[in-house]
Amino acid sequence: MILNKRTRRLRTSEGIRAMVSENAVTAKDLLAPLFIIEGNNKKVPILSMPGQSRFTLDLIFKEVEELLTLGVPSICLFPALPEEKKNTQCTEALNEKGLYLTALREIKKRFPELILMTDVALDPYSSDGHDGFVDPVSGEIVNDTTVEMLAKMSVLQAAQGADIIGPSDMMDGRVGAIRGALEKSGFSNTMIMSYTAKYASSFYGPFREALDSTPKKGDKKTYQMNPTNGREALRELRLDEEEGVDIVMVKPGLPYLDIVKTLRDNTHLPVAVYNVSGEYAMIKAAAQLGWLDGTKAMAEMLTSFKRAGADIILTYFAKEMAQLLRD
Ligand code: PBG
């Protein structure tokens, strides 16, 4: 055959493949979610997330130090509270002497260069296991009073030194309310990374095990997005932009790569993707069974996020991927 065009020419050697490679994950793109628990020198493994644990603050320090050494610049902290600290009013969320706000303060003091992202939603503090307040009569997830609470939480988190506020709740109007509260309180440099397109997904199971935060009643479908919808993500994007968001996020990642691409093509803001607990569990489980090469599958999956247009990847693989990049 005489073929003028042969796409295989550009694939003939490691060298040429590297030269024409379009996308790469680097450690600076990664953001590691970490779970904190009360106490000292304790590490409680999360069974459905092999290799991931809930750490006490002293051990979180060690994790952060390792991540920074590996070139991972950022973490997002989630509190795993004992059941007796949870109630319907989610009061622990505003406790400046409590686990979460203390941890943010101490982490920032120790690692000023770390980009510290927070979680803003009621589920870690809620005896109902929902991201908003639950109306005791109707069972409805109440929007507006939840948003007031989220704004208060955000200001307290910013006051402890948080760099990025991360509303993961999907209430209407929360980005604007949080932005307004931050501005009014003098935290004009504190960023908001909104969970802009967060879907009501079955891939959050292992995370809810980590926090023991499965809803006691019902599901999250009245606030998180319907997995059937793509256009609706653009509506969420426009609202977040109007309300003053700094970074927009899609969650989960792998089953929603089209949404990552849609956001990338429709905003000038940085786009983040949350490679969630179930995506991590899926690869770990297959690797444990010998059905997949876990390391290669991890790298391929994380690269797919860059290809789809993500700038930032929140992933439980952050440390493992950074180690792979280093070696
Ligand atoms: C809840 C929240 C969830 C995650 C982060 N924040 C789960 C949920 O909506 O129930 C999931 C993260 C993951 O699965 O890794 N505010």
Image: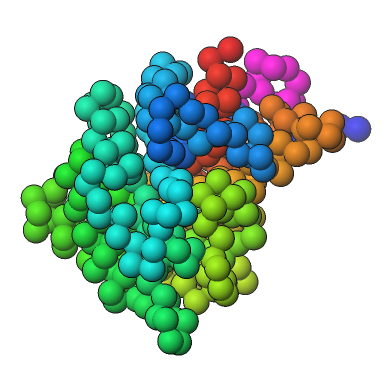
**Which residue is painted at 19% across and 53% down in the image?**
155
Colouring used for the render: rainbow
Q: Quadrant of residue 37?
A: top left
**Which residue is painted at 47% across and 54% down in the image?**
83
- The vertical placement of 41 against 162, above or below, is above
Magenta-span inclusion, residue 19: yes
140 or 311, which lies in front?
A: 140
Q: Main secondary structure of the magenta part?
A: helix
Q: State the quadrant of the C terminus.
A: top right
Is 212 left, or right, of 95 in this rendering?
Answer: right
- The vertical placement of 39 against 148, above or below, is above
User: How many numbered dots are placed on residues in this image?
Assistant: 0
Q: Quadrant of residue 97?
A: top left
Residue 78 x/y as whole percent: 42, 45
* Residue occupying the far bottom of the picture: 138
* Residue occupying the far right of the picture: 1
309 or 144, which lies in front?
A: 144
**Which residue is painted at 83% across and 34% down in the image?**
289
Q: Does residue 165 appear in this view?
A: yes
- The vertical placement of 47 against 169, above or below, is above
Residue 15 x/y as whole percent: 65, 15
* Residue occupying the far front of the picture: 84
Is 201 left, or right, of 166 in this rendering?
Answer: right
**Which residue is painted at 41% across and 27% down in the image?**
40
Magenta-span inclusion, residue 153: no
Q: Does residue 196 appear in this view?
A: no
Is 70 left, or right, of 115 in this rendering?
Answer: right
Residue 263 x/y as whole percent: 45, 57
Q: State the quadrant of the N terminus.
A: top right
Residue 7 x/y as whole percent: 74, 34
10 or 34, which lies in front?
A: 34
Q: Which residues, given as a range, are shown in magenta? A: 8-20
